[in-house]
Image (spheres, grey):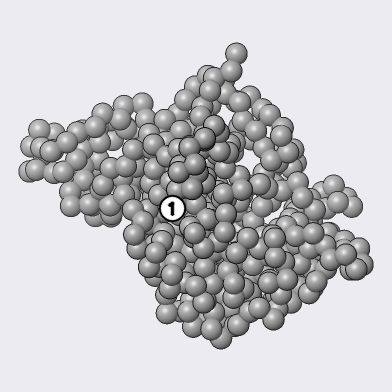
Amino acid sequence: MPVDLILRSGTVIDPLTKRNEVLDIAITNGQISHMAPRIGPDITAHKEIDVTGRIVAPGLIDTHGHIYQHVTGRFGLNPDLVGVRSGVTTIIDQGGPSCMTLGGFRHFVAEPADTRVLCFLSAYLVGGLEGHLYPELYGPGQTNVEHSVRVARENADIVRGIKGHAEIGGISRWGLEVVKIGKDIARQAGIPLYVHLGQLWPTREDAPDINADDVVRELVPLLEEGDVLAHPFTRHPGGFISMDTGEVHPVVWAALERGVTVDVGHGSHFSFEMAEQVMRAGIRPYTLGADMHGYNVNVPNITDSEDRQANPFAGRAPFSLTNAMSKLLYLGMSLEEVMATVTLNPARMIGMSDTLGSLQVGREADISVLNLEKGRFEMTDNSGARVTTNTMLTPAFTLRAGRIFEADSPLNPPVVPVQ
């Protein structure tokens, strides 16, 4: 029997099926057709790839990207550079498109991309327009519940949640009203609300002092099962750790007990110090998003003006999804736990675990092949802190619906051994 491709002797790690074993995988017409310890000579392939010693995983799902390129200002990156060319088969844009701009997102970003592109619709009419520069565009007057709910329902194939913000800069202007509106949109549309924690905007100059702990205490009880708290490891005011007590907020524990989940949302919000403190208290992230965007991409030694004009973010980021996965390994999570944060758990979060997040015969061949590097490597966080780890995950290549993509994105950070 002929097949298109066989991946030979890779270590399959699949949290849903609890597999952690060496298997061959055959792909035909974009789907997984066979999985076995050894696919015999009765099945012939047009192409075989030896992946001995590599991890073969369900296609990685990045829960937090900014990929509305050319629309969300300098935030929007090319979806395939942070997607299939970085070892990721599915990426979720967090709050780039709004009810007014989703049509453009679908037509100009999601449909042309080789990566599977989904989104959490912005609660704000303007979407993710470099909002940190224009906070006044993100008040309650710049929302429309009815329109947002209708667009979310009519585009349920790509709209899998609602994105909102809860931080002291916004609270100083309009309190929690916008978050409440976002929750109303999410509840009516029947999808989760994803909430940014940690200061984003400067506080209003004439506003009274805002207690970041009070923001958390008032916000978190609004969230329900399936909603998501992002940036648990932020060093900015308004995270999981109370500035008064130095402990995890009691309301956070209560939210986790009723089914609210935690997304790392790495980006500019990851601190080793805060991560160690939160995880030492017993909290484990449920999902992991890289939060890649233009402001956290380095642009080294680009002198050609045409290159700069064509791709102002060409260069290497200081992190990526696999780099963020390596940080969770460093922090003490097992490889199986880490893999769940980028496969099974995000698939469940967006209600797509019947099609995404697992390697099974008959499913679409979305596969991420990873290297598990051993040695001594340096990693950094948003505060500039540096740590040395002995294990790094890096992308080798990706299969998206059976089509091979090399992990050649210029945004992949270099992995340089240290002495």
Question: Is residue 354 shown left or right of residue 229?
Answer: left
Residue 49 lies, in percent from the top left, at 24, 32
- Residue 203 image offset from top left, x and y in percent: 82, 62
Image position, residue 191 (x, y; %): 52, 72
Instruction: Give the vertical position of 353 relative to 146 (above or below).
Output: above
Residue 6: image quadrant is: top left
Residue highlighted by disc 1: 79
Q: Which of 5 and 80 is in front in this view?
A: 80
Say what secondary structure mark 1 lies in: loop
Q: Is residue 396 left or right of residue 63?
A: left
Q: Which residue is drawn at 49% across and 52% down?
A: 77
Amino acid identity at mark 1: Pro
What residue is drawn where x is 57% and y is 49%? 294
Residue furthest front as drawn:
305
Name the quarter where the C terminus is drawn. top right
**Residue 274 image offset from top left, x and y in percent:** 74, 42
Which sits in the foreground, 152 or 102? 102
Q: Which residue lies furthest to the bottom in this view?
A: 146
Viewer can see residue 116: yes
Task: From the viewer's perspective, tell me whether residue 345 is left or right of residue 1.
Answer: right
Image quadrant assignment for residue 103: bottom left
**Residue that appears at 43% across and 70% down:** 104
Counting every numbered tag in the picture gives 1
Q: In which quarter of the image is the N terminus?
A: top left
**Is residue 388 depicted above or below 325 in this figure?**
above
Q: Residue at x 41, y 61 (%)?
A: 109
Q: Mark 1, residues whose alpha carbon is within 10 Å: few (<14), some, or many (≥20)?
A: many
